[in-house]
Image: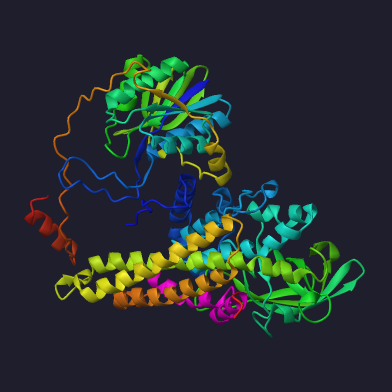
Amino acid sequence: MTTLPGAPHPYLREEHELYRSQLRRFVQKECDPHIEAWEQAGELPRALQLKAAEAGVLGIGFPEEFGGTGDDDPFYQTIMAEELARSGSGGLIASLVSHRIGSPPIAAHGTPEQKDRFLRPVLDGSKIAALAITEPGGGSDVANLRTTARLDGDHYIVNGSKTFITSGMRADFITVAVRTGGSGMGGVSLLVVEAGTPGFTRSPLQKMGWWCSDTATLYFQDCRVPVANRIGEEHRGFKAIMENFNNERLMLSAQAWGFGQVCYEEALAYARERQTFGQPLIARQVIRHKLTDMKMKLDAIKAQLDLLCWQITQGHMPVAEICLLKNLSTGALEWIAGEAVQIFGGAGYLRGAKVERIFRETKVLSIGGGATEIMKDLASRQLGY
Amino acid sequence: MKALVSVKRAVDYNVRIQVKPDGSGVVTDGVKHSMNPFDEIAMEEAVRLKEKGVISEIIAVTIGGQKNEETLRTALAFGATRAIHVKEDGEIQPLTAARALAAVFKKESADILLCGKQAIDDDANQTGQMTAALLDIAQATFASKVDIADGKATVIREVDAGLETLEIDLPAVITADLRLNEPRYLKLPDIMKAKRVQIEATNLGDLGVEAAPAIKVTKTAPPPARSKGVMVKTVDELAAMLKQKGLV
């Protein structure tokens, strides 16, 4: 049994809570009963995309004239991440809203025609978007990517490959970072590669967690992409990629908090119910202390998450703090999920327990969207160390 | 055609209800409240009737304190065209609510009152019926299907024996059962738009209704805790146990 937060909050208003209650109903009704089947299938059904659009999950923060909500209040985005996390499935979030990383460059730098073609059908749930940056030869080093795009008349000829691409198997529109110019960050452009383009192939990847999210390696071999599919100016793609990282990391922090909260609630309920040596687990001080430590960490993360969101509403972008919050939240989740499985004991090692899945899906949050080590480095540079 | 939809603010269905230690009621302070789920179904039905062009105006009405405004905002996000807040800080019992609704219904010259069959807080299941009686108009309760044409409503209602179909003249009161429809998800732009609508305020005195509670609650107690279940291995064992407990 879970209760919605009833305590007063300095930043959230009743409309935030109303939106949260709609999402909670969406997750309970449309997602929770099917997660296990989707995990086995290795992907989400397309029908879910349409339902999510209907429920107002996909349009948050995107321009109204292309089917978005037109509202840039970051709280709606973190509420969405927190509520989707209640499903206990990271794969659900990663794949259902992969457009949250694939589509922002189009929304920010695309022409009206490009938004009409590549954004509108994604927001109405009929098409799926993905982002392809990482290459087999390098991870966070965006400035040194090797996939090339050579101009040939009104087309680019793309050669190279991308890996760890979320929604990579299903995506209809993939925002791909390519090298159109010289070395370094000044030679990178963004192209939308459409499914079915000759010379573009993909293969699925098997993962530790996130099973219901289709992850792929993409291959481009003399793949001809129209110049009309280039997002923004040539050689100016690096900045467009970087712009969305703050938002992505904030979302990852909200997710990590949401999963931690699920672990805490699940462990608390189990500790109350599980009898050992004639007493419920919760009667043991050592168990109660684990639970209070979980709550202590979660409350601190949530306070910082909400503060940073509020600062963004005030026009301030706390870049270093977002990096550090990502580390704080994902690191805490690794510990919380581990302790939750420990409280569950053998039952926490069995497939089907939410804590078991979340435990397998902690590492990806500490790695994706900028690994912990990269985040520390970026934060220290931002802070002028 | 004009529909009135009554919406009640009730403790959220996700909340674990706790009885106050002194037995004077249940804990409502600091507890999440939302629109009574059966009223959401009534609201959804009204919006669908409006989308079909059967009705042209939906007036949401609530009775209660300042916080009931949130419930009206939810109704506006659903698609209510107007919202009336009957302000009353004291306890509101079914007969008081029915009198207030009847007064608003008359004042607005509404054609239909749609409401939930009951509220999930007290489960009284009285307000709709009482309102129809006070107005001396037809009623169809526990509706699972509603069709409106030519000044009549054809309502399929869920009764103990199965389904019953009624044809009633308008104006009428229709109360919504669980299977009437599935309320839509409220979209963020609609939630934001609802914030900007001016809510019309009135109170029981203006409506000529006296808030005289007719029912006195003497004690509130939680249901007895369920004892732990027993696993049986065979059907025979189950039958023997049920016999032993005198249950069959």
| Quadrant assignment, res B156 | top left
Q: Residue furthest right?
A: A153
Q: Is residue B224 above or below residue A152?
A: above
The residue that appears at 30% across and 77% down in the rendered structure is A345
Q: Is residue B222 left or right of residue B42?
A: left
Decide which of A205, B192 is in the foreground and name it: B192
Q: Quadrant of residue A349?
A: bottom left
Considering the image in quadrants, where does the N terminus of chain A appear? bottom left
Q: Is residue A126 visible?
A: no
Q: Which residues are magenta?
A: A354-382
x, y percent for residue B210:
28, 19
- Nearer to us in this view, A15 or A56: A15
Q: Is residue A381 left or right of residue A31?
A: right
A201 is within the stretch colored magenta: no
- Outermost residue on the front side: it is A384
In the image, what residue occupies the spot 65% across and 70% down?
A168
In percent of width and height, residue B212 lies at 24, 22
| Foreground residue among A302 and B124 | A302
Query: Which quadrant is home to the C terminus of chain A?
Result: bottom right
Q: How is the rendered protein coloured?
A: rainbow
Residue B231 against residue A7 in the figure, above or below? below
**Chief SS of the magenta region:** helix
Task: For residue B172, say whether it is visible.
Answer: yes
Q: Relative to B70, is A328 above or below?
A: below
Residue in the picture at 55% in, 63% down = A44
